[in-house]
Amino acid sequence: MAKRPKKQKSATKSPSPATKSPSPATKSPSPATKSPSPATKSPASKSPVSKSSASKSSAGALSESVGKLRQRIDRLDAEILEKSNRRAALTIDLASLLSDGADAEKQVELDRVIETAADSAVTSNRGPLDDTSVRALFRELVSGCRAQLRTCKVAFLGPSHSYSYLAAIDRFGQSAEFVPVGTIAAVFAEVDQGNADYGVVPLENSTDGRIADTLDMFTRVRVRISGEVPLRIHHQLIGKSSRADIRSVCSKPQALSQCRNWIAQHLPQAEMVETSSTAAAAKMAAENKSVAAVASRQAAVNFGLNLIARNIEDNPRNVTRFAVIGQQSAERTGDDKASFLFQLPHQPGALADAMGIFRRGRLNLTWIESFPKPGARNEYLFFVELQGHEKDLRVRRALAALEKKTERLELLGSYPRCEPTD
């Protein structure tokens, strides 16, 4: 019995080989334990198999997202088309209620409803589209709606792609029928004789001032101003050659005048040649590589010319204001202008007495020009523009008082005030 405990002690003291000398799997971890496999040692995303799988998954998710967005855009496009056609149908319904074509006031009311859409949209715009884009979008929608009722004919100082053409597009959109004519007098004649519903003529420029031909025609032809289009004018030097090869620069006199400092500084060797329009100048540049034109970007595109120099106008805030002429004034909007011309007796203090009427009536004058009376020496007509509408009480009172002091007084029209557009 005494020997058994000793044997147990010996067994404890001298462990069996399996205990004393661990097996290689215990003593020396297997490569899988000691040196983790690439899948264990490195993150799963770095495995070639896992990276490819993740890439495919990401591409699939992107493709699915793009597909869903395209479907949403397609649905919105369909809704826009449907609602645009509904708007056109409602415009036709409105026209049927104002169907008496002989009633000029009803036609003016219809035009007002059609034309104020862009202004209302810009007022409500919250982006991300900017106001210029929103105005252009609604301008074309309105133009298309108007075309469902009747073809709107608009005369302008041509040819196409002149600045007068761009002003006409800005006002009436692409769905109107545009009638290019050769002179400002011809624009007035087209409207006066009923060959065009409206005309677009330049009225004044921020650099060169009044457009004398336009003011002269207002003294001769009875038409009304029904709108204004203040257009920012950016002149481009366009042609087929480099600046070093240019021997002459051509354009209409006003455009050359508005760029004269730039031309003198950058093209001192070039001869300046006057043309009837900027579009005519672009045509000359297209036919002769030594000729460059001062014209619009649209003219360059139309005639296949290069933009040799951009925005060369001396005044970066260069604006030409165009008048829209027709047979009726526009309806009152609350933010309007009224224009008229008058002739005073040739005596001391006559002009001061006339100006006093506007001061007493608290009427703000926004433009005043003197113009030599045709066929008379040292006699002048005065063109005046003020804030207000001819139907406003203060304006009516001022005109009534002015009529007593003048030899001639003619209301030229009332129209909504507009901000310059590009």
Image (cartoon, helix red, strand yellow):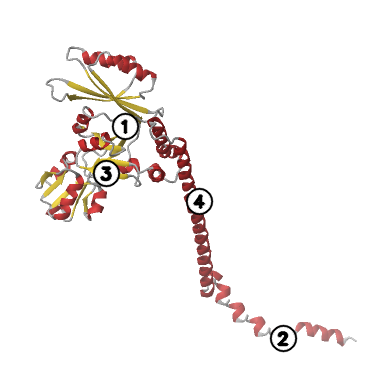
Viewer-side residue, 163 vs 308: 163
Residue at position x 53%, y 59% in the image: 68
Residue picked out by circle 1: 327
Q: Where does the image place residue 60, in percent across and percent down from the top left?
A: 52, 66
Residue picked out by circle 3: 179
Q: Where does the image place residue 316, in percent across and percent down from the top left?
A: 25, 39
Cα separation, mark 3 vs mark 4, equals: 35 Å
Drawn side of residue 148 relative to residue 32, left or right: left
Disc marking residue 18: 2
Residue picked out by circle 4: 79
Drawn side of residue 418 relative to residue 162, left or right: right
Residue contact between numbered discs 2 and 4, judged by CB atoms under 8 Å: no
Q: Name which quarter of the figure residue 420 lies in.
A: top left
Q: Amino acid at mark 4?
A: Glu
Cα separation, mark 4 vs mark 1, equals: 38 Å
Residue contact between numbered discs 3 and 4, judged by CB atoms under 8 Å: no
Q: Name which quarter of the figure residue 370 lies in.
A: top left
Q: Amino acid at mark 1?
A: Gln
Q: Amino acid at mark 3?
A: Val
Q: In the image, which is nearer the foreground, mark 3 or mark 4?
A: 3
Residue at position x 30%, y 31% in the image: 225
Residue at position x 72%, y 86% in the image: 18
* Label 3 vs 4, first from the N-terminus: 4
Drawn side of residue 143 relative to residue 262, left or right: right
Q: Amino acid at mark 2?
A: Ala
Cα separation, mark 1 vs mark 2, equals: 117 Å
Cα separation, mark 2 vs mark 4, equals: 83 Å
Helix, strand or loop at mark 1: loop
Q: In the image, which is nearer the foreground, mark 1 or mark 2?
A: 1
